[in-house]
Image: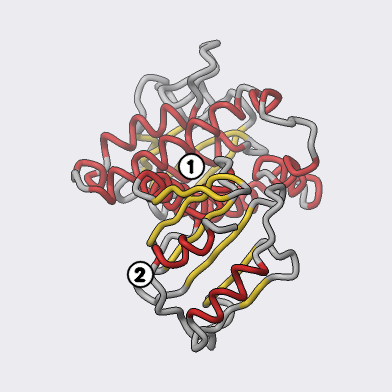
């Protein structure tokens, strides 16, 4: 049997380490997880030097406890945690990451960035995050984990399963974010009276949100496969898309156009409403309308 050992009441560092092993270390996806008091090892453990230790007929890995190779509590280095050491090990051991292609490169970068956040959290650096006392930080995964421990105390397996599922989703989100960053580099920048705009042809909807976070007053995305169009303005931009809505309806009356009540979002097609008819207008034609705002 393969066993992963970590400390009781596992935190983000411990669970991320477990997730990395079960998700990416070959033949460890069904490993059993056992919990010990923080700092300790399995009672039968004799070696702190080996990553995979043979105990009876079991292969055992200790993470974030026991002062072994995948622990970090012997050092004050705030750029290291159990997850970072585990990732360094798994990345070398997994044949998945030895293949060089764009998809694998994005996955490696995504995990690098996830582990970097986990490392910062493990060293309490969330106190330096922007607007650190704001309520929205309570929606962060680390705070949800703390709330779960209050709601359902002494259920280590539950915490590990919950956060591991969330990390699976986060991996996809980080990969999407990296892809969006690349799409923005290829986007068309334009000017309006309300500020700069950015337009792109991509199936990645995260690019719109990212453009807004970067300060662009307006972002427009046209889906090159389905023809759908999404136009969004920052809440603080002063943009009113009513005129754009009226103009685009005249230019392409067969398409379905929906103007949000805020007047800052104009949609043509949505996964939420597959009955909407896509626009035949080119991205450049829609940008020309937006430039007259």
Residue that carries the numbered disc 1 in the rendered image: 18
Residue 59 can be seen in this image: yes
**Front tag of 2 and 1:** 2
Image disc number at residue 224? 2
Q: Is residue 28 above or below residue 288?
A: above
Q: Is residue 265 above or below residue 13?
A: below
Is 238 left or right of 168, judged from the image as shown? right
Residue at x-position 59% and y-position 45%: 195
Residue at x-position 52% and y-position 77%: 269
Tell me where residue 126 appears, x and y as whole percent: 66, 28
State the SS at label 2.
loop
Q: Nearer the viewer, residue 47 or 203?
A: 203
Residue at x-position 47% and y-position 66%: 286
Give the CA separation, mark 2 to mark 1. 39 Å
Tell me where residue 255 appears, x and y as whole percent: 50, 84
Among numbered discs 2 and 1, the one appearing first in the sequence: 1
State the SS at label 1.
helix
Is 179 left or right of 250, judged from the image as shown? left
User: What quarter of the picture does the C terminus occupy?
Assistant: bottom right
Q: Nearer the viewer, residue 191 or 71?
A: 191
Q: Is residue 59 above or below residue 67?
A: below
Residue at x-position 52% and y-position 50%: 197
């Amino acid at each position: 049997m393969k066993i992963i050992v970590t400390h009781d009441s596992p935190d983000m560092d411990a669970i991320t380490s477990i997730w990395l092993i079960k998700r990416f270390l070959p033949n460890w996806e069904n490993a059993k997880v056992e919990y010990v008091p923080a700092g300790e090892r399995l009672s039968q453990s004799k070696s702190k030097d080996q990553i995979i230790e043979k105990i009876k007929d079991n292969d055992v890995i200790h993470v974030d406890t026991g002062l072994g190779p995948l622990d970090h509590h012997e050092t004050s280095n705030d750029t290291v945690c159990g997850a970072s050491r585990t990732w360094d090990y798994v990345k070398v051991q997994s044949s998945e990451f030895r293949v060089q292609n764009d998809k694998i490169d994005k996955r490696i970068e995504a995990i690098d960035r996830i582990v970097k956040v986990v490392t910062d959290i493990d060293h309490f650096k969330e106190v330096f995050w922007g607007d650190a006392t704001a309520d929205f930080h309570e929606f962060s995964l680390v705070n949800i984990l703390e709330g779960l421990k209050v709601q359902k105390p002494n259920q280590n397996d539950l915490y590990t399963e919950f956060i591991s599922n969330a990390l699976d989703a986060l991996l996809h989100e980080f990969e999407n974010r990296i892809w969006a960053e690349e799409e923005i580099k290829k986007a068309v920048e334009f000017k309006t009276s309300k500020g700069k705009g950015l337009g792109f042809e991509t199936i990645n909807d995260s690019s719109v949100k990212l453009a807004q976070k970067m300060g662009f007053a307006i972002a427009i995305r046209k889906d090159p496969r389905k023809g759908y169009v999404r136009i969004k303005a920052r809440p603080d931009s002063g943009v009113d898309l009513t005129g754009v809505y009226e103009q685009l309806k005249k230019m392409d009356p067969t398409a379905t156009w929906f103007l949000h009540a805020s007047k800052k979002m104009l949609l043509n097609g949505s996964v939420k409403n597959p009955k909407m008819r896509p626009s035949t207008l080119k991205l450049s034609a829609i940008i020309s309308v937006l430039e007259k705002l």
